[in-house]
Amino acid sequence: MSQTNLYRKPLLKTITSADFIKNDKRTLEQLCIETVNCRVSYEDVSEAIEGKAYEMCENGNVDNAINHLKPVAEFFESLENKNDEQCRDLADIYLLIGQMLQFALKYEESIHWFSHSIIVDDQYAVPYHNLAISYEKTGKVDSAIRCLKQELLLAPGNYYSYLILSEIYKRQKNFTAYEDCLHQLLLRDPENIQGLFKLIKFYEKNETNADVSLLYKKVLAVTKTFSSTEWLIRIYVLSGMKQYSGALDTIQQWKISDPSTTMVCLAKVYIYGCMKKVALRNRAVEEFVQRNSGKIDKIVKKCDEFGSVFGSGIKGRIEKNIIKRALELYSKLAEL
């Protein structure tokens, strides 16, 4: 019997990938050995292998995880007359090894594996995306752009990649390409809040003749489950329109949808400041400090997230006051 037929040997019992991830006690090494020895089909254990590989990465065992995966790659490489499914499986193994190296910040090494994944299956969009990230991290910006463009040709619905590509153009100061990229995104996904926001900021900064108010309305017309950044964008838009009551209503909706977030406090600090309501602003500052236990690192991280939408100037002023208050409150507690 050929290796190809052995590889496709059916299991006696059908077990889903989810079952493996949840219940299988075998190690990554055991799963890889069983795959190579044709005791299991790779298709049935691929998600379990991926999950266990990342678990090893998170525990600092990247090299060991990769050493377990390499024999699986060699197994697929040895198959004669590989069909499309087997080529995709091999591409997935190369991709997984590359992703683990990327996780470990070994970007140059990851480029080798992502490139192999593309060689095996050049119609597979995912490795182009990962390869673009590693190229960008190693300063190969033009190569990163080419990979992202190819990814979007293969998978034009990968909207996040438009945002990554637009940011690369922005850093290159290629503002024509930056604007065009965002327009391409919005043609495919008219309700992409981050894409709309990037255009708003671009037009506001460059004082173009574009109708920013129309973009504002498009942001506010979107109805869906919002991420933290998207909530902040909505509040930014409402404050830009001087609709402070609407901004406070939005903050309340955000608080109801995510009671654990402390970002609502930062939003209130800013809006109450715009409204000149000093007492309410100070109360929001103290609430934010207390909910973050006065920990400066947590405060700075949250302020950075806030600043990614509202800008470094506003973020700097708010952060300065909050850190000052945190030091006052928690220095007094330490003295007791």
Image (cartoon, rainbow, N blue to C red):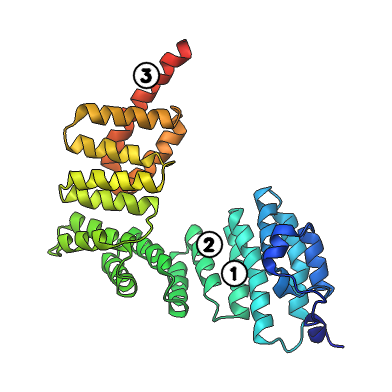
Describe the element under mark 2 as helix, strand or loop.
Answer: helix
Q: Tell which tag, 3 or 1, sits nearer the viewer.
A: 3
Residue beneath the point at 80% across and 86% down: 5
Q: In this view, does 178 lie to the left or right of 154?
A: left
Q: Cβ–Cβ below 8 Å for labels 1 and 2? A: yes
Expressed as whole percent of the image width and height from the top left, the position of residue 50 reads 67, 63
Could you say whether the residue bearing mark 3 is in a helix, strand or loop? helix
Position of residue 67 measured from the top left corner of the image (x, y, whole percent): 76, 61
User: Could one spot residue 193 in this view of the protein?
Assistant: yes
Q: Looking at the image, is 118 positioned above or below residue 231?
A: below
Q: Residues within 10 Å of mark 2 (few under 14, many from 20)?
A: many
Could you say which disc has been placed on residue 328 in the image? 3
Between disc 3 and disc 1, whose residue precedes?
Answer: 1
The numbered dot on residue 114 is 1
- Amino acid, disc 3: Glu
> Which three-letter amino acid code belongs to the residue tagged 1?
Phe
Residue at 61 percent across and 74 percent down: it is 117
In the picture, the disc for residue 134 is 2
Q: Furthest-left residue in view?
A: 209
Instruction: Give the label, 3 or 2, closer to the camera.
Output: 3
Q: Say whether residue 193 is left or right of residue 158.
A: left
Neighbourhood count class around disc 3 (C-alpha, 10 Å): few under 14, some 14–19, many 20 upward: few
Residue 286, image x, y percentages:
34, 27
Label 3 and label 1: CA atoms lie apart by 51 Å
Residue 4 position by quadrant: bottom right
Q: What element carries label 1?
A: helix
